[in-house]
């Protein structure tokens, strides 16, 4: 079981980009740019200061999310390929 401090670090690393996206969208700004800026800030300030356990869990979590999102995109592309009415049929 992870310690409370590690769980807090992981929660802050995962909620930071989401909260920055929500704030940017609420202000009518670009959410993608807000997430990228937050990622740069987390890379410089948070990553060197979190524990090794939190680094490992965050790394695995981000890799899992990225792999799942990539899989969903390719599934939609594959489904869309057969859903489009081709002029050569």
Image: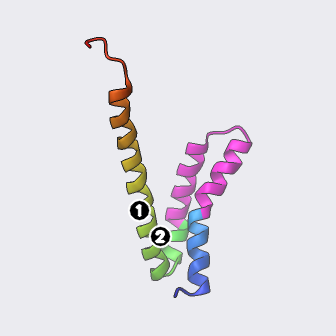
Tell me which residue sits at (61%, 69%) in the image.
Answer: 12
- Residue located beneath label 2 in the image: 58
Q: Is residue 61 above or below residue 52?
A: above
Quarter holding the C terminus? top left
For disc 2, the neighbor class at 10 Å (few under 14, some 14 to 19, many from 20) is: some
Q: Residue furthest front?
A: 89
Relative to 43, is 73 on the left or the right? left
Q: Which mark is residue 88?
A: none
Mark 2 or mark 1, whichever is nearer to me = 1
Label 1 residue SS: helix
- Residue located beneath label 1 in the image: 64
Q: Is residue 29 above or below residue 11?
A: above
Q: Nearer the viewer, residue 85 or 48?
A: 85
Q: Check if mark 2's residue and mark 1's residue have beta carbons within 8 Å.
A: no
Q: Nearer the viewer, residue 5 or 85?
A: 85
Q: Is residue 38 magenta-colored?
A: yes
Residue 11, quarter of the rendered image: bottom right
Locate residue 61, reporting x and y percent. Answer: 45, 66
Q: Nearer the viewer, residue 43 or 35?
A: 35
Q: Residue furthest right?
A: 27
Dot placed on the residue nearer the N-terminal end, 2 or 1: 2
For disc 1, the neighbor class at 10 Å (few under 14, some 14 to 19, many from 20) is: few
Locate residue 86, reporting x and y percent. Answer: 31, 16
Relative to 83, is 12 on the left or the right? right
Q: Which residues are magenta?
A: 15-44
Tell me which residue sits at (49%, 63%) in the image.
Answer: 43
Magenta-colored segment: predominant secondary structure: helix
Q: CA distance from mark 2 to mark 1?
A: 10 Å
């Amino acid at each position: 079981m992870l310690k409370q401090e590690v769980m807090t670090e992981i929660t802050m690393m995962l909620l930071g980009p989401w909260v920055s996206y929500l704030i940017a969208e609420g202000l009518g700004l670009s959410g993608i740019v807000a997430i990228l800026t937050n990622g740069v800030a987390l890379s410089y300030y948070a990553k060197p200061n979190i524990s090794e356990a939190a680094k490992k869990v965050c790394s695995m979590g981000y890799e899992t999310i990225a792999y799942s999102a990539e899989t969903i995109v390719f599934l939609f592309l594959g489904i869309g390929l057969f859903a489009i009415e081709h002029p050569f049929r």
